[in-house]
Amino acid sequence: MAKKKIASRRSVSAAHIRAQESRHLMNTYKRLRLVFTHGRGCRLYDSQGREYLDFLGGIAVNALGHAHPRLVRVIRREAGRAIHLSNLFHNAYQGPLATKLANWSGLHRVFFTNSGTEAIDGALKLARAYAHAKRNGGGASGQKKTRILALENSFHGRTFGALSITYPQKYRQPFEPLVPGVDFVRFNDVADLEAKFDNSVCAFVLETIQGEGGIFAVNEPFWNRARALASRHDAALIADEIQCGLGRTGRYFAYKKFDSLPDIAVVAKPLAAGLPLGAIIANEKFASAFAPGTHGTTFGGGPLICATALEFLTTVEEEDLLARVRERGSELRAGLEKLAAHFDFIREVRGEGLIIGIDLTCDGAPIIQEALRRGLIINCTHDHILRFLPPFIISKRDITEFLKRFEAVLWAVSKKMPTRKSTKASKLYISIQQQSGLAAASRQL
Ligand SMILES: Cc1ncc(COP(=O)(O)O)c(C=O)c1O
């Protein structure tokens, strides 16, 4: 039955699908020409029946790969019971899922959303609501406590709140004016953070590891200072763990390598392993700022989706996937570093667990194209940073196969591609590294 269905989907003409989309979809995505029909584990299959190793995982979503039997079983079971009930009623899965998220995060209370960007907007609302409730909208000096700090090079989503704390102009400019009262802090720059953090701030939002920005991790001194300043000014420290959280680093949350917790953590992408679900997780202090009616959603936290998320988190625990992420991540990183020694257009390999980036001195598009030709799915951000986000279930054999094929990709591309030493890529890299205080330690440009 399943085989028959897959075969009929394969027979759909890719050209017909593209033509129909170009007539009737809004023009928001620069899509590759491929049409994928189905996946199994870490492999995807296109309309021609070609197989690909998936090292993108739906952009950090498909943490259990494709068609994982545990997820398929739960989705089938719940689809036959109740897909949606509404948040006017209790359902069997929100409580257990919230309990697990609280345990994993070290925080206390959860609000479920449909996406990452909504969770970010909700977290900003929570921080503002707390500030209003505590200070009646005014700081100690009578000044409004509504300012929000975020980091340069950040990406937090596309709705107005999340967009307002997203740094790159290309995302913001077409939609201005955005939410006022946002200031950006230089990445990992403690002095800049101290200069901008005062009693008018209600929230400081950071990605523990910047994903879209190119795999840049917040360092410990910066995190510690952010924690201390947020506590001193009674502002929320908000960790956006939408891309780097829920196991991707080999820890439940990326911030677990630090000694202190954020006030609010935001997750989405892999939470329901492919179904749309996000969550705001807050400590008691901040969570108490929401009361019935202050925030809500129609779809967020439905029974089918929460049951699926619960199955994902349980699978991570029962199958010891965090250890697997750490082991496979080290193998992948070591293999990429070995390759980097042979190609002078690779400037740096960075990241941890299964969130790894390769910084190039050249345009990454030809590498992506060549990788696809050789059956590898990877991604490129900022035009020059290759991003690897494979599923947590990736095997040692898959990593070996990937590295072998990827080496062939790099040799093929290196023959055609002159290295460029002074590019936009170099400028972004230098700027971020200087802010991180790592410039001296990194390779000569
Ligand atoms: C760190 C981070 N925050 C927020 C978002 C927005 O999430 P969503 O696309 O689910 O709205 C993303 C998406 O890429 C992300 O990587």
Image (cartoon, rainbow, N blue to C red):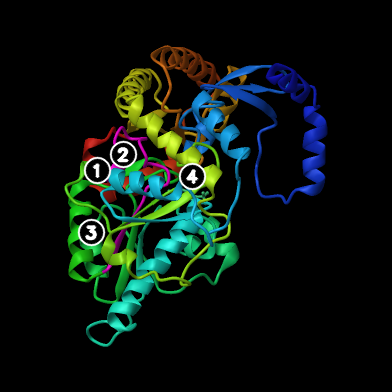
| Badge number at residue 306 | 4
Q: Residue at x 46, y 40 (%)?
A: 309
Residue lying at the far bottom in this picture: please name it: 142
Q: Amino acid at mark 2?
A: Tyr
Q: Which sits earlier in the primary sequence, circle 2 or circle 3?
A: 3
Q: Which sits earlier in the primary sequence, circle 1 or circle 3?
A: 3
What secondary structure do most residues of the magenta stretch adopt?
Answer: loop
Q: Residue at x 45, y 63 (%)?
A: 122
Q: Report how far apart the C-alphas of labels 1 and 2 lie in the structure.
A: 7 Å
Q: Is residue 239 magenta?
A: yes
The answer to whether residue 136 is above or below residue 428 is below
Q: Amino acid at mark 3?
A: Ala
Q: Which one is in front, 84 or 276?
A: 84
| Badge number at residue 252 | 2
Determine whether, in the image, residue 102 is placed left or right of residue 374.
left
The quadrant in which the C terminus is found is top left
Report the span colored magenta.
235-255
Q: Which sits earlier in the primary sequence, circle 3 or circle 4?
A: 3
The answer to whether residue 48 is above or below residue 127 is above
